[in-house]
Image: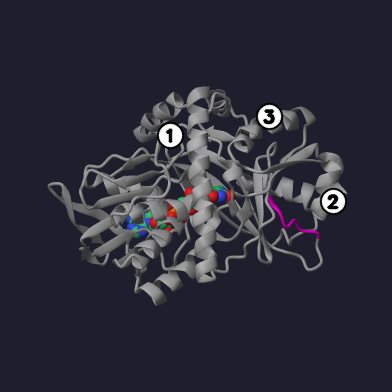
Amino acid sequence: MKTLVLGGGVVGVTTAYFLGKAGHEVTLVEEKDALGLEATGGNAGIIAPGHSFAWASPRAPRMLWQSLRGAETAIRVRLTSDPRLYAWGLRFLRECTSGRARRNTLIKLRLCQYSQAVMNDLVRAEGIEYQAIHRGALYMHRDPVEFEAGIKKMALLAEHGQKQEILDANALARLEPAFEPVKSKIAGAIRDLGDSSGDSRVFSEELARVARDKHGVTVRLGTRVTALRADGDRIDGVVTSGGVLTADNYVLALGVGAPVVARTAGVSLPIYPAKGYSSTFPLKPGGLAPTISGVDEQWLVGWSRLGNRLRLTSTAEFAGYDWGWTPRDFNNIHKLARDLFPDAADYERGEYRACLRPMTPDGPPILGLGRHRNLFLNCGHGHMGWTMACGTARIVADLMTGRMPELDLEGLTVRR
Ligand SMILES: Cc1cc2nc3c(=O)[nH]c(=O)nc-3n(C[C@H](O)[C@H](O)[C@H](O)COP(=O)(O)OP(=O)(O)OC[C@H]3O[C@@H](n4cnc5c(N)ncnc54)[C@H](O)[C@@H]3O)c2cc1C
């Protein structure tokens, strides 16, 4: 079975690996000159079932409204002339009831937990090194009232299998010495013990190497997919910058590029970009840097230690296909870095970029068959793609090879 996997982010690479392992003759197609350079290369690095909360929640409409009036809210929207934003936005607003938010959160949580188990097995079997740290993740609050509310909110995940620890500022500083000098600024943190962190770009590179060496997967870089060529209910080729490529099966794993390419075959995917800002700083020798990844729930910045670098990310902005940024967009990150981890890293030598999360209105990704009998979807992983990649790749590979997925797919958008 010849299969073309389109997209060389963590989702495409994991899919190529599982299909190669199952005996498919796989070619992975990526437009950039290396793998994992888009969202995969800029994310906060947290493998975080403990962060499964659906963005579409009863609080979201107010937040979006406030953002239109200039407030720095967790989720923001910028008005554009793009009608896709409004069509997507209406579907998002429909998901904002408490019932839908709870349901979507639990679907995401189940997928994240499954994915983590698949990833652990894979890492053990293949010996993948990806700068992993298995010490949980911290969901940190500065305000005592918000901290109490955070504990209540996180209880939903604890009821469904996430082990948590509630830490006041002193306990937090004992666990993570980087907080000792700044503990007076902190009310406390909820530590999700099952979360971890690591570099998803390094993981993708390493796994692609295994897929190439052990399972004969071909990686074709520098090849932009411009269209799918449909013939009735089948795809019979992919138009690329390097000519038309053909296979028996095709997998769409293009991140925010997925809806654009799907449209060329008449397939409409409810995926829209949510822009985030990402910065990476070299650690200072002897500096007091955090080892446990986390999120400042008030200032809305996430951090991870990736080897000898500190990654900090912020913001979720619906602003279309716009990768632009200005130094001002990193104000929050700089403020947090200097406030919490002042001598952890060399903040004069940062690498900066914006990257786009491929968001679905409800939150879970879109998996399985599209309208065509040989076009499979693995896209729309939103803010959780690093966490979900191994699990969704395994599910899609199982569906394609006639195996029953191990995970109960109830509630997921999966067509077989
Ligand atoms: C700021 C930020 C922080 C995040 N933090 C976390 C986190 O802590 N934990 C977590 O689990 N997730 C996090 N995420 C989400 C996660 O990074 C994404 O969900 C995940 O990377 C999606 O993977 P992907 O492979 O689908 O997309 P991508 O990584 O974007 O990969 C898609 C690939 O397809 C290629 N491509 C696109 N169009 C074409 C085309 N036409 N032809 C050829 N190639 C094409 C791109 O070049 C790219 O390499 C974060 C995201 C952002 C932006």
Q: Is residue 124 left or right of residue 219?
A: right
Q: Using the image, tell me which numbered label, if any, was put on residue 152.
A: 3
For the rendered model, the colour scheme is one colour
Residue on which disc 2 sits? 174
Q: What SS does tag 2 mark?
A: helix
Q: In front: mark 3 or mark 1?
A: 3
The N terminus lies in which quarter of the figure? bottom left
Mark 3 residue's CB less than 8 Å from ligand 1: no
Instruction: Mark 1: give few (<14), some (14-19) or many (20+) Cα within 10 Å.
Output: many
Q: Residue at x 53, y 47 (%)?
A: 113
Residue 361: mark in rendering: 1
Residue at coordinates 62% horizontally, 65% vertically from top-left?
131
User: Where is residue 301 drawn, in percent x and y?
Assistant: 66, 44
Above or below for 351 versus 190: below
> Which amino acid, mark 2?
Arg
The numbered mark, 3 or 2, whose residue comes first in the sequence reads: 3
Query: Secondary structure under badge 3?
Result: helix
Going by the numbered disc 3, the residue's amino acid type is: Lys
Residue 214, horizontal then vertical, whole percent: 40, 75
The magenta region covers 288-293
Q: Residue at x 15, y 47 (%)?
A: 233
Q: In front: 310, or 124?
A: 124
Give the distance between the C-alpha atoms of the residues marked 1 and 2, in whole angstroms.
Answer: 40 Å
Q: Which of the pair 238/122 is nearer the observer? A: 122
Above or below, 127 relative to 187: below
As rendered, which of 211 and 260 lies closer to the eye?
Answer: 211
Identity, as a three-letter code, of the amino acid under mark 1: Pro
- In the rendered image, the residue lying farthest to the left is 232
Q: Is residue 324 left or right of residue 334?
A: left
